[in-house]
Image (cartoon, grey):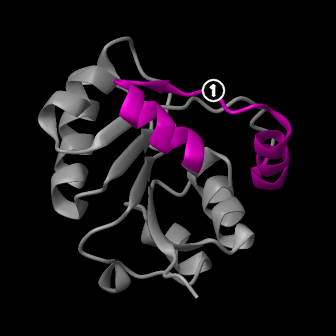
C-alpha cells in the first residue's frame, strides 16, 4: 500500500477541526493538527511533540485580524513545516495569498470555507455540502489544491 500523504491543520477551531475530521475520516491521509490552545489538540488526541518536521499539505485555519501579522505567522509555519502545498482556508484580504507565496517555497492556494458557524458538526456538514472554491497563485498550485480537495 502506498504511503499516506501527511496533512497538517494550523488552527483547530470552527474551520480547522471539521476539516481535520473530514480528512481523517476519508482515510487517505495521516492528519496532524496544531493550535495555540492545546486543549483543542488534546480533545483530538494530539500533542505538539508528535508533529512531523515536513508535511505534504498544510491547511491554515486561523483568523486574519491583521494582514501583515497573518502573512508573517503563516510564513513562519511554512518555513517550519515546509509543505509542498499550502492552503489558506481563512478569510483574508486580497493579495494575501500572493504575499505568502513570495515568502515561502510552496505551492499556495486560497480556498475559503462556506457555511454557517452554528457548531462544529453543522460546519462539518456545510463543508461537505458546498462546492470547494480554489483561488491559486499559479496553475500548478491550482491543480495540486484541486487534487487535494477532491478528497
Q: Does any portion of residue 15 appear in the rendered image?
A: no
Left or right? Give the position of 76 relative to 38.
left
Q: Is residue 78 above or below residue 28?
A: above
Check if residue 145 falls in the magenta segment: yes
| Extreme residue toward the top, this view | 94
Q: Main secondary structure of the magenta part?
A: helix
User: How far across and how far down the image is residue 97, in percent?
Assistant: 33, 25
Report the span colored magenta.
119-147
Q: Secondary structure at mark 1?
A: loop
Q: Nearer the viewer, residue 38 or 115?
A: 115
User: How far across and how far down the image is residue 3, in percent?
Assistant: 48, 82
Q: Is residue 113 above or below residue 38?
A: above
The residue at 85%/47% (across/down) is: 125
The quadrant in which residue 133 appears is top right
Instruction: Tell me the residue that label 1 is attached to.
Output: 133
Quadrant where the C terminus lies?
Answer: bottom right
User: How far across and how far down the image is residue 127, in percent?
Assistant: 76, 42
The residue at 53%/58% (across/down) is: 12
Quadrant where the N terminus lies?
Answer: bottom right
| Number of other residues with Cα within 10 Å of mark 1, as a class: few under 14, some 14 to 19, many 20 or more | some
Amino acid at each position: 500500500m502506498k504511503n499516506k500523504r501527511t496533512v497538517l491543520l494550523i488552527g483547530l477551531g470552527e474551520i480547522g477541526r471539521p476539516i481535520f475530521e473530514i480528512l481523517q475520516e476519508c482515510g487517505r491521509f495521516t492528519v496532524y493538527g496544531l493550535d495555540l490552545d492545546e486543549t483543542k489538540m488534546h480533545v483530538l488526541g494530539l500533542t505538539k511533540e508528535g508533529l512531523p518536521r515536513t508535511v505534504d499539505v498544510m491547511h491554515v485555519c486561523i483568523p486574519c485580524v491583521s494582514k501583515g501579522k497573518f502573512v508573517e505567522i503563516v510564513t513562519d509555519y511554512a518555513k517550519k513545516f515546509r509543505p509542498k502545498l499550502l492552503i489558506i482556508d481563512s478569510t483574508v484580504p486580497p493579495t494575501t495569498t500572493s504575499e505568502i507565496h513570495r515568502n515561502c517555497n510552496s505551492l499556495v492556494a486560497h480556498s475559503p470555507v462556506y457555511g454557517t458557524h452554528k457548531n462544529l458538526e453543522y460546519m462539518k456538514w456545510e463543508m461537505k455540502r458546498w462546492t470547494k472554491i480554489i483561488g491559486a497563485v499559479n496553475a500548478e498550485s491550482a491543480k495540486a489544491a484541486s487534487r487535494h480537495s477532491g478528497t
